[in-house]
Image (cartoon, rainbow, N blue to C red):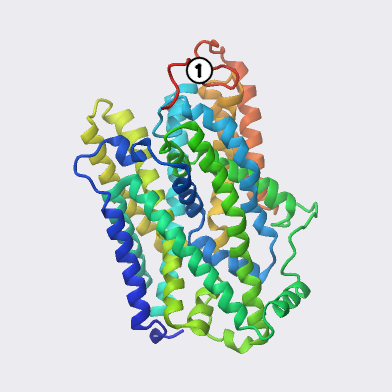
Amino acid sequence: MTNTSFSLGNWLILGGYIAAISILGSLFYRKKTSAGDFFLGGRRMKAIPVAISLVAADMSAISYMGAPAWTYQHNLELVWSSWTYLFVAPVVMFIFMPFYARFKFYTAYEYLEKRFDLKTRLLGSAIFLLMRGSHVAIVIYAPSLVLSLITGMPLAACVLIMGVCTTLYTTLGGMKAVIWTDVMQFSILITGLIAVVWFSIARVPGGLPVVWQVVNEAGKLRLFNFSTDPTQLTTFWAAAIGGGFMALSTLGTDQAYLQRYFTTSSLQEGQRSILLDAIIIVPVSLLLYLVGPVLYTFYHFNPQQLQGMPSMDAILPFFVMTQLGGWLAGLVIASIFAASMAVMSAGINALTTATTVDFYQRLWRPNSSDEEVVRAGRMGTILWGAAATGAALFAGRLGPIINAFNLINSFLGGPILGIFLLGMLTKRPRGNAAISGAALGIAVVSLLAWKTQISFFYYAIVGTGVTFLAGWIFGWLQPARSDEELVGLVRGLHAPAENPQT
C-alpha cells in the first residue's frame, strides 16, 4: 500500500462521513438538560433503535477487520462465540432485566449496593471501568491502524482523529446522540459489508460456485469441532459454552449494554430490544465471518497480489484498497470507522455514567444538583475520551485484534457475573462473601492462565463457577439478612407494587 492509494475522493467520503456523524450527534446537545436525559435519553427510547445500537456495540473494527482475518486463516468455529447471544438473551430478559426494572437505576452496580453493600458496588463498577476502558482503547486502535496503513499518516495522528471526533459528539449529545448515531453507523457498516462480499465474489473466476468449492476443500467452512481437548481454542464447547458465559456477563452486567436497556420506556421494551439484538446479530456475524473465506479464494488464485500486506489483521482493508479502489474503498473504510465510532461513543458514555453515578455522586457529592451531575458527566466524557485515546497507542501489544478484548473479558467477566448471580439467586451471602468469592475466582483463573494451555474461553466458566460457589460457602460465615430486607433483590422475593419502572 502506498500513500497515494487513498485518493482525494476517498478522503472526501471519509471526511464527509466523520463530519456528518459529528454534526448529527451534536444536534442532540441541550444546554439545559437533566441527568436522566443526558445519561439515559429520558427513558423514552423504543426497542428497535436500542436493539440496533446494541448490535453496533459488538460490531467495531475489532470484529469488522478481525473476523475476516480469522476465518481467512482458520475456519468458522469462532462464530459460535457470537451466536451464543441467541441462547443467553432469554436468561438476561427474564432473570436479570426484572431486577433492574424494579428500580430506576442509572448503573447496574447500584443493584449490587442494594443487594450487598457499597464496597461490592464499587468493586463491580471498578471492574467494569477496567474492562470497558481497555475495550474502547482497542476500538480506537483498530481503525486508526487502517488509516495509518493506507495513508502513511503517523498512527498517533490517526488515533487523535478517531478519538477527538467521537468524544466531541458524545460529550455534547449524551445517550440520545449515542443511540441515533449508532443507527446511522450500523446502516453504513452493513452497506460496506455487503459491498465487500458482492464485489469480492465478482473478482473470483467462476463466482460463487468456485468460492464454495475452494473454501470447502480448504476446510474454511468448518463450523463444528467437538474435540474434548481443552487446549484447542475454538472447539464447540469452548466457543459456544465458554463464549456463552462471556456473552451473559456482557449482556447481563456490562454498563455499556445495560445503559441502553435503561433508556427504554418499559421492561417489555427493554426485553424486546435484547431479543432483537440477539436475532439481528446471528446473520450479521455470519456475513462478517464469511468475508474471510471469500478473500481466501481470491488470493488462492492470485497469491502474488498479497505482496505488501503489512499484517493479517489488515487483509480486509488491504483487499479493498488494492483490488476495489475508487468510491467503494472510501465507503468501506468509512464503514470501518462507523463500526468503531459507534462502539467508542457508547463505551465512553457508559464509562462516564459509572464514574459519575457510582463514584462522584455516591462518594464525593451525594447532594449534587442535576446540573452539577450533567456537568460532571460532560467533563468525565472528555477525560475518558482522552484516556482511551492515549491507551489506544499501546493496544497493538495484545495480539490478534479479534480476540484482544475476549482475552481481557475472559479474566474479569466470569467473576463479575458470579457476583450478580450470587445476589440474584441466593439469599445468604453478604458483601464480604461476594467479594471474597470474586477474589478467589480471579485467582483461580489467573492460575489456570499461568499453569495451563487451556482455551481462554473456559476462563469465564471457571471464574463464574468459583465466584458463585465460594461466595455461597463464605456466606454461611455471616448472619443472613431477613427476607424483608431482600424483597425485590432476590429471585422469588417480589418487589412491592409501587416500585416498578415506568
Expressed as whole percent of the image width and height from the top left, the position of residue 400 reads 56, 64
Asked if residue 75 is positioned above or below residue 149 in the image, the reply reads above
Q: Is residue 445 above or below residue 360?
A: below
Q: Quick check: 487 above or below 51? A: above
User: Which residue is pictured at 45% across the width and 32% down the height?
Assistant: 266
Q: Quadrant of the C terminus?
A: top left
**In the displayed structure image, the side of residue 347 where residue 410 appears, left or right:** right
Q: Residue at x 49, y 47 (%)?
A: 51
Which amino acid type is shown beneath numbered disc 1? Ala
Q: Is residue 281 visible?
A: yes
Give residue 293's position: percent from left, percent from top.
Answer: 66, 72
Depth order, front residue of 476/324: 324
Examine the rendering and report whether any part of residue 448 can be seen. Answer: no
| Pointer 1 residue | 495
Determine the image quadrant of residue 339. bottom left
Q: Position of residue 431 (x, y in %)?
A: 51, 23
Identity of the residue drawn at 55% across and 46% down: 276
Q: Residue at x 41, y 30 (%)?
A: 105
* Mark 1: secondary structure: loop
Q: Position of residue 231 (x, y in %)?
A: 73, 55
Between 131 and 193, the one nearer to me in the picture? 193
Question: Residue 77, located in which quarter of the rendered image?
Answer: bottom right
Q: How many marks?
A: 1
Q: Residue farthest to the bottom?
A: 304
For label 1, count other residues whose C-alpha is less than 10 Å away and answer few (under 14), some (14-19) or many (20+): some
